[in-house]
Amino acid sequence: QSVLTQPPSASGTPGQRVTISCSGSTFNVGINTVNWYQQLPGAAPKLLIYNNNQRPSGVPDRFSGSKSGTSASLAISGLQSEDEADYYCAAWDGSLHVWVFGGGTKLTVL
Amino acid sequence: EVQLVESGGGLVQPGGSLRLSCAASGFSFSSYDMHWVRQATGKGLEWISAIGTSGNTYYPDSVRGRFTISRENAKNSLYLQMNSLRAEDTAVYYCAREPHGEGFDYWGQGTLVTVSS
C-alpha cells in the first residue's frame, strides 16, 4: 500500500480534459512539493511536473499541476493518444524521511 | 546530452550480493543529488536510496542495512551495493538525477535484477 493515494485508472477521449488526484498527509504533500512522472509502456519514467506546478522544458502546456492542503492533482487537457501511460505522484515525507510515490494511475485514451 | 546508463543487473540467488553501477555523462555529476528507484514487474515505483553532493545517504527501512549507495565523482559514477538479497528485491533498478528540490529530472533505462534460486 502506497503512502500517496492515486486512483488506479483514469480514462478519457481525445481532446478531453482529465485529472488525476494524489492524496497524502501533512508529513508529505501537506508540507512538501509534489512531482509528477509519466511512464510510457516499456520506458523509464519521465519528469512531467515539479514543485507542484512547474513544467520542465519540453513538456507541453497541456499538462498542469496543482496542490491544495494534503492533495495534489495532475490535469491533462486536449488529451492525445500518446498520453496513454502510467502517471505517478511523488513527494518527500518529512516524518518517514523517505521519498514516497503514489501507486500510479493508468491513463487510457479511449 | 545528459545520459545515465545502469549496468550490473542479473540473476542472483537469495542471500547473494550484486553491485549496480550508473555511468553519468553530459553534466557536472558532482553537483547533483543522485537516487536509485526500483520497479517490480507490473508494480509501481519505489524509491530505495539517495546520496547528496556531500555524500550524505538516505534509505527506506526496506533496504537499510542491506543496500549501500555510493558515488565516485572522479569517474562520474553512482553505485548500489546490494547484500542479503531477497526475492522481493526482484525489479528493474533505475538511477535518477535530482537538481535539488526539482524532482528527478533524468532517469536511466534501468537494469533488471532477478533474485531467484
Image (cartoon, helix red, strand yellow):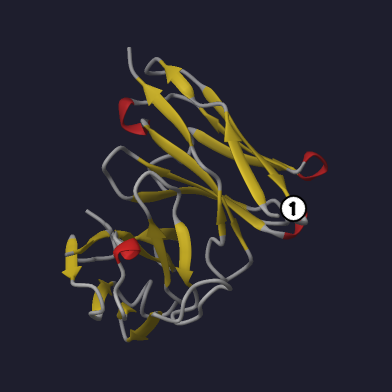
> Which residue is farthest right?
B74
Chain letter belonging to callout 1: B
Q: Nearer the viewer, residue B12 or A80?
A: A80
Question: In the rendering, at what x and y percent does residue B11 appear?
Answer: 43, 18
Q: Is residue A41 above or below residue B31?
A: above
Numbered disc total:
1
Q: Residues within 10 Å of mark 1 (few under 14, many from 20)?
A: few
Is A83 above or below relative to B75? below
- Quadrant of the image containing the C terminus of chain A: bottom left
Tell me the residue that label 1 is attached to. B26
Outermost residue, top side: B117
Which x, y percent locates residue B86? 35, 26
Residue A18, by quadrant, is bottom left
- Image x and y of residue B21, in percent: 62, 34
The residue depicted at 50 percent of the width and 80 percent of the height is A54
Q: Residue at x 37, y 18 (%)?
A: B14
Question: Residue A68 vs residue B79: left or right?
Answer: left
Measured from the top left, where is residue A87 in percent x and y? 33, 62
Q: Residue B1, located in which quarter of the rendered image?
A: bottom right
Most distant residue in the bottom direction: A68
**Can residue B105 be seen from the camera position used here?**
yes
**Residue type highlighted by circle 1:** Gly
Please tell me which residue is depicted at 31% across the width and 70% down the height of the picture.
Answer: A80
**Which residue occupies the foreground of this view, A59 or B42?**
A59
Disc 1, SS? loop
Residue nearer the viewer, B27 or A14: A14
Q: Is residue B106 left or right of residue A1?
A: right
Quarter of the view holding residue A94: bottom left
Could one spot residue B59 in this view of the protein? no
Reply above or below: B50 against A57. Answer: above
Residue appearing at x 47%, y 76% in the figure: A60
